[in-house]
Amino acid sequence: MSTAKAAYGDFQTPLALARRVCAWLARRGHAPATVVEPTCGEGAFLLAAAEAFPRARGFGLEIDAGRATTARERLRRAGSAAEVRVGDAFTEPWAERLAGWEPPVLVLGNPPWVTNAALTVLGIDNRPARTNDDGLPGLAALTGKSNFDVSTWMLRRWLELGQGRELAVAMLVKTAVARRVLEHAHRRELALHDASLHRIDARASFGAAVDAGLFCFGTRRAAAIACSVHAELDAERAEGEIAVRGGTLVADAAAYDRARPVLGVADPPWRSGIKHDCARVMELRRDGEGLVNGLGERVEVEDAVIFPLLKTSDLRGHDLPRVRRWLLLPQRRLGEDTSRLAERAPRAWRYLCGHAEALDARRSTIYRDRPRFCVFGLGEYSFAPWKVAISGLAKQPAFTLVGPDAQGRPTLLDDTCYSIGFDDEARARVALAGLRSEPVRALLRALVFRDAKRPVTKEVLDRIDLGALGRGGATRG
């Protein structure tokens, strides 16, 4: 995406899609007196709304003067009296405008599909002020969990502005944005009703490989937070329902209700794998002559610091997957002084020092003021000989049995994976059977949002109570 495209929140909506949306809204009974497009671009939605709702007053705002001019000209040629102004949707006094508009008001359009962090990197000021509205704890608020699509800010803003008013929102957004708005409404106890999400083919319409849809809701009255999910715009029957269950927004309310018998607290908790952020140096492969790093260099280090490693691509539900990588592990416990390797494993220490520039350049703040060449996600649980593991990145979650290598060394996992550990294979297999049962599959369908960057999280896994299935026996916490 070009800098200009990012700045103005393109993707421009095809007129044909805007017409489909507005015609669908009219069939659903919407009859607005005022139609608002907060980021109107070249005016596709204002044009479509003028056709579907000819009696409504139209108002559009666009930050780019050239596009605003194009929108005005298109509307003039179509015989529409809709007003288009140049302005910034993030600073526009919407509350004042809303007070002067005749209800019912329909807010529609296609707000920016770019993240606040991406605009910061591009040096673009067309973005909302950053706040920790989600109440994230310190570390999470400083990392990726606090990043958000600016469209999230916009929809939350209209949700808040519309409280108690005859106002409806219908916007094309990433499906993750719809989820965040529903969570915001639940957390703030805001009025939101008749919510629905209708999937669209974002690749066909915008050339974007993302999960997206038309997200609609009203703000006049309070209701239980729930959103029907439809396979496409014209699909009458919902394929599922996002709703609040047990104080949490769930991806599939019906599946959650079926999974209640296994809801609880995992004991011991699930653990993430090793985080090192330098695969070229720390991860090794074997060829016919020995170990080779990601730089293509031959590596000769002590066997005591080399462990078999599995990554997210290895965990597909096929038990005891073949190991293709090995990890050079400089520590056996978190915070251990790595300089001791100089005596215990001098070849490994020399290797690490020889690649100090790459290791010292690791960007994450977690490595600051820590032992040199350190790793994270390390504990007694890392060295359990048997594990049940799962990829955090999988759209279709699958539990996998992981065992030691031929020399008895425990197999480690990288930080995209989660696992629970066992001292013997039999107990691991009993737990695996429970985790592959229908109640657990239903629980994952309920709690896993497949459009998320990391669909499977520790928070999700820690809600599985294996004891409720009469299975368990994890021994490494």
Image (cartoon, rainbow, N blue to C red):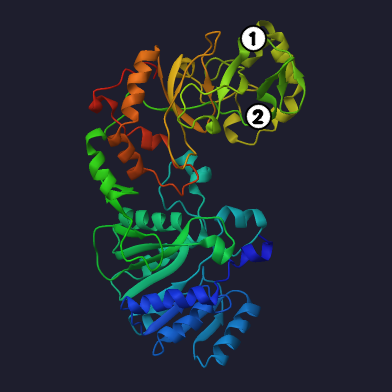
Q: Position of residue 89 (x, y in %)?
A: 52, 71
Residue sitting at x 29%, y 35%? 438
Q: Looking at the image, is 111 positioned above or below residue 82?
A: above
Which residue was labeled with disc 2? 279
Q: Looking at the image, is 378 positioned above or below residue 194?
A: above
Sequence-first tag of 1 and 2:
2
Q: Quadrant of residue 158?
A: bottom left
Which amino acid type corresponds to the residue marked 2 in the rendered image? Ala
Q: Is residue 345 left or right of residue 155?
A: right
**Observer-nearest residue: 33 or 454?**
454
Mark 1: give few (<14), some (14-19) or many (20+) Cα within 10 Å: few
Q: Quadrant of residue 159?
A: bottom left
Q: Is residue 384 left or right of residue 264?
A: right
Dots 1, 2 in contact, CB < 8 A: no
Which amino acid type corresponds to the residue marked 1 in the rendered image? Asp
**Observer-nearest residue: 61 or 416?**
416
Instruction: Report how far apart the C-alphas of labels 1 and 2 lie in the structure.
Output: 18 Å
Residue sitting at x 50%, y 62%? 201
Quadrant position of the C terminus in the picture: top left
Mark 2: give few (<14), some (14-19) or many (20+) Cα within 10 Å: some
Which residue was labeled with disc 1? 303
Query: What SS does tag 2 mark?
Result: helix
Q: Is residue 101 visible?
A: no
Residue sitting at x 32%, y 17%? 473
Q: Position of residue 466 (x, y in %)?
A: 29, 26
Q: Position of residue 60 (x, y in %)?
A: 50, 80
Q: Is residue 307 left or right of residue 102?
A: right
Quadrant position of the N terminus in the picture: bottom right
Q: Looking at the image, is 197 positioned above or below residue 318?
A: below
Q: Is residue 259 visible?
A: yes
Q: Position of residue 59 (x, y in %)?
A: 47, 82
